[in-house]
Image: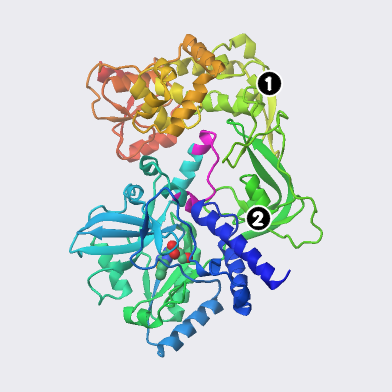
């Protein structure tokens, strides 16, 4: 390939990666790989300037602007940082600073490099008036409405603030919030997100700020841009920002010399796994403003700051095969089966491959040597492939064309990353998945029916939809059994239906009939109808028929119901089999309307109550209803805010101990009944 061709190829690739990173928030290569490509291009452009394009990716900070938000100009260019990856590169940076300043008399401020995305916040007379994304560095998107939903960002400043203030920092998602969000999405049969950073970036670009508010984002600010007191050095600026009530990291430290910098870096490389959010390195900045000005900027980066990126732990292994999993919505996810390898203390046998695009981008083939990393996500992922290995297969991976479970040809709708199996009603994992969702804890909560048991009932042709559960009879299921293998095939256990098991199953199914309507609605597993949406719909329409009859306009007029949800509901109820199933569930005795409760009394008013164990006179849902009818509030776990624990038989000792330790009042079933009588 000629240098001219290579320059064109690299430019095209980098533009594409920029778009994936900044606009789609779905990068397919690591930052380091990106930097390597960029360095190669910079090098070639320097050597052959005649082939360089004025719009080359090397001239850009990165990013494009989404059409849907208003584009606004930044007061000062919003720059990125150059990266270093080892001690000697950092020493070179320090030497350069020393040379340019012609002194060794300077201080650094060391900060965490938060792995989120940059934001500029503008306050006028103490009020937040604008929040702008980095965009292309000169202009960004006005995402004020969405940023206002972030709790840690004050809408009004405190203290002695200046008339105009601009601060910059990073928006990010905590690891725990990310895991929770993914669990919810998995429960709803939706594709999971790849990592906290992409999710945070994707979230801030959502058009619907109420949707943004549901996903907890956080912010830490690291730069004072416009201010009326120019005498402050960088560190003092950060302290000043704190006095205005702005969120600033407590981990920031002043460093007098290179050794102190290095100590800071090594300490945080060890401690970062204990942080509640992800950092991908540290940022080192010259403290004095005068010295910052003296050092100035290159075309893209400040010369007074640099990022030091941590090495992420990687494992090298072989890709044995790719298998395809079918979820309850029919979405087909590719999974990499790996030669087991140790990574950060656990043995990794599988890695997520997300979707067909990622497979193509990585060009991963069976037999390949692959590099596996763990990010914020629980499931590790393949980040790189050794494409230079001469022994690799010459056949690129072709994504499954047919469902691995039912052999139906897969389809992919316009604009969707996932392939789907359209055989909704006859594809086993879809059928079982829907029933598993129906009985799950947040839905009908039939905990006497675990995953294995659904499988037994299904393979004996006893259930093919949730309504069938309510037709099961004692004699039909007594004695059924099956050997169930664990996901990775390493363990197996026999599940069998003995008398006690059967009794519990039927009791659990019976008890679910008193679950409130909103849970029934959620349990149906309608796309985009999660717990919160189900609650909203139930409150508004009061009954199932009302929702089934509602047209698009009626639906979108309901608070927090957007067009996506409305369309999904209309599609769902269009299907005759779905309507039929609802009528069968109704006939079985499930709640199809909101129970307007008149309070039976106020004996429990304002009390937060936990119920635990098995009760003589009540099934648990009935007991919870009783609590509500006396003004009490059901809560699921014991904390210092709990007022009362109603202890049934077989309550776990740990729960009791916790309640005792926190001084929570514990009553028995009969004592409780006395309280309300
Ligand atoms: S300072 C002109 N400080 O990392 C200086 N950036 O890779 C601008 N980042 O664009 C940035 N933590 O989005 C700075 N403590 C920190 C940071 C930080 C995270 C992000 C920021 C920046 C990118 C550079």
Is 190 magenta? The answer is yes
In the rendered image, residue 9, in percent from the top left (x then y), is placed at: 65, 64
In the rendered image, residue 147, in percent from the top left (x then y), is placed at: 34, 51
Tell which of 665 and 285 is nearer to you.
285
Ligand 1 near label 2 (Cβ, under 8 Å)?
Answer: no
Q: Is residue 599 above or below residue 371?
A: above
| Screen quadrant of the N terminus | bottom right
Query: Is residue 293 among what the camera can see?
Result: yes
Looking at the image, what colour scheme do you see?
rainbow
Ligand 1 near label 1 (Cβ, under 8 Å)?
Answer: no
In the rendered image, residue 285, in percent from the top left (x then y), is placed at: 40, 74
* Number of residues whose C-alpha sits closer than 10 Å to that of mark 1, classed few (under 14), some (14–19) or many (20 or more): some
In the picture, measured across the screen, residue 474 lies left or right of residue 164, that is right
* Residue located 55% across and 54% down the image: 20
Q: Secondary structure at mark 1?
A: helix
Residue under label 2: 342
Of badges 1 and 2, the one in the foreground is: 1
Is 593 magenta? The answer is no
Query: Is residue 503 among what the camera can see?
Result: no
Q: Secondary structure at mark 2?
A: strand
Tell which of 166 and 13 is nearer to you.
13
Q: Which residues are magenta?
A: 185-200
Mark 1 vs 2, N-terminal side = 2
Single out the residue that lies furthest toward the bottom. 102
In the picture, measured across the screen, residue 5 lies left or right of residue 626, that is right
In the rendered image, residue 88, in percent from the top left (x then y), is placed at: 55, 79
Quarter of image, res 106: bottom left
Asked if the residue under mark 2 is in contact with the one under mark 1, i.e. CB atoms within 8 Å, the reply is no
Q: Is residue 320 above or below residue 271?
A: above
Residue under label 1: 459
| Screen quadrant of the C terminus | top left
Instruction: Compute the Cα span from label 1 to label 2.
Output: 37 Å
């Amino acid at each position: 390939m000629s240098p001219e061709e290579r320059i064109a190829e690299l430019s095209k690739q980098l533009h594409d990666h920029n778009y994936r990173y900044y606009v789609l928030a779905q990068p397919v290569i690591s930052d380091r790989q990106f930097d390597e490509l960029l360095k190669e291009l910079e090098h070639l452009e320097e050597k052959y300037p005649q082939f360089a394009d004025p719009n080359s990716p090397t001239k850009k900070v990165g990013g494009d602007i989404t059409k849907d938000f208003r584009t606004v100009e930044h007061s000062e260019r919003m720059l990125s940082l150059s990266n270093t990856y080892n001690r000697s590169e950092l020493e070179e940076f320090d030497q350069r600073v020393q040379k340019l300043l012609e002194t060794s008399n300077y201080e650094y401020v060391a900060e965490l490099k938060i792995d989120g995305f940059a934001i500029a916040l503008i306050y006028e007379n103490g009020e937040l008036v604008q929040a702008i994304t980095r965009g292309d560095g000169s202009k960004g998107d006005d995402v004020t409405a969405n940023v206002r939903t972030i709790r840690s960002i004050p809408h009004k400043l405190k203290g002695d603030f200046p008339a105009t203030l601009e601060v910059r920092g990073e928006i990010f998602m905590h690891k725990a919030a990310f895991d929770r969000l993914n669990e919810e999405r998995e429960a709803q049969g939706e594709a999971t997100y790849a990592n906290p950073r992409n999710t945070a970036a994707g979230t801030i670009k959502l058009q619907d700020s109420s949707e943004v508010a549901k996903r907890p984002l956080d912010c830490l600010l690291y730069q004072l841009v416009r201010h009326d007191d120019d005498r402050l050095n960088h560190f003092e600026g950060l302290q000043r920002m704190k006095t205005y009530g702005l969120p600033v990291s407590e981990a920031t430290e002043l460093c007098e010399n290179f050794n102190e910098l290095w100590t800071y870096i090594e300490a945080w490389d060890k401690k970062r796994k204990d942080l509640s959010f992800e950092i991908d390195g540290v940022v080192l900045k010259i403290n004095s403003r005068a010295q910052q000005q003296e050092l100035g900027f290159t075309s893209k980066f400040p010369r007074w700051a640099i990022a030091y990126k941590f090495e992420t732990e990687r494992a090298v292994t072989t890709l044995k095969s790719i298998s395809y999993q079918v979820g309850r919505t029919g979405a087909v996810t590719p999974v990499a089966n790996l030669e087991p390898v140790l990574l950060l203390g656990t043995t990794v046998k599988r890695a997520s491959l997300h979707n067909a695009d990622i497979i193509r981008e990585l060009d991963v083939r069976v037999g390949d040597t692959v590099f596996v990393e763990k990010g914020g996500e629980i499931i590790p992922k393949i980040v790189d492939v050794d494409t230079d290995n001469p022994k690799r297969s010459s056949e690129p991976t072709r994504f499954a064309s047919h469902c691995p479970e039912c052999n139906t040809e897969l389809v992919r709708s316009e604009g969707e990353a996932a392939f789907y199996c359209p055989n909704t009603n006859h594809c086993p994992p879809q059928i079982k998945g829907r029933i598993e969702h129906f009985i799950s804890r947040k839905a009908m909560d039939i905990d006497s029916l675990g995953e294995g048991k659904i499988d037994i009932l299904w393979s004996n042709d006893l259930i093919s939809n949730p309504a069938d559960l309510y037709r099961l009879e004692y004699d039909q299921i007594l004695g059924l059994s099956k050997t169930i293998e664990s996901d990775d095939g390493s363990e197996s256990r026999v599940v069998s239906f003995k008398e006690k098991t059967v009794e519990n199953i039927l009791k659990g199914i019976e008890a679910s009939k008193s679950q409130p309507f909103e849970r029934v609605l959620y349990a149906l597993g309608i796309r985009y109808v999660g717990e919160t949406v189900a609650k909203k719909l139930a409150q508004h329409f009061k009954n199932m028929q009302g929702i089934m009859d509602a047209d698009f306009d009626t639906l979108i007029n309901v608070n927090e119901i957007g067009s996506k949800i409305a369309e999904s509901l209309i599609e769902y109820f269009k299907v005759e089999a779905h309507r039929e199933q609802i009528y069968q569930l109704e006939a079985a005795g499930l709640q199809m309307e909101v129970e307007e409760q008149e309070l039976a009394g106020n004996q429990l008013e304002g009390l937060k109550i936990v119920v635990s164990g098995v009760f003589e006179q009540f099934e648990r849902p009935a007991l919870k209803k009783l609590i509500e009818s006396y003004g009490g509030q059901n809560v699921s776990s014991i904390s210092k805010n709990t007022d009362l624990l109603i202890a049934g038989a077989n309550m776990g000792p740990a729960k009791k101990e916790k309640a005792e330790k926190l001084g929570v009042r514990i009553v028995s079933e009969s004592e409780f009944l006395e309280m309300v009588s």
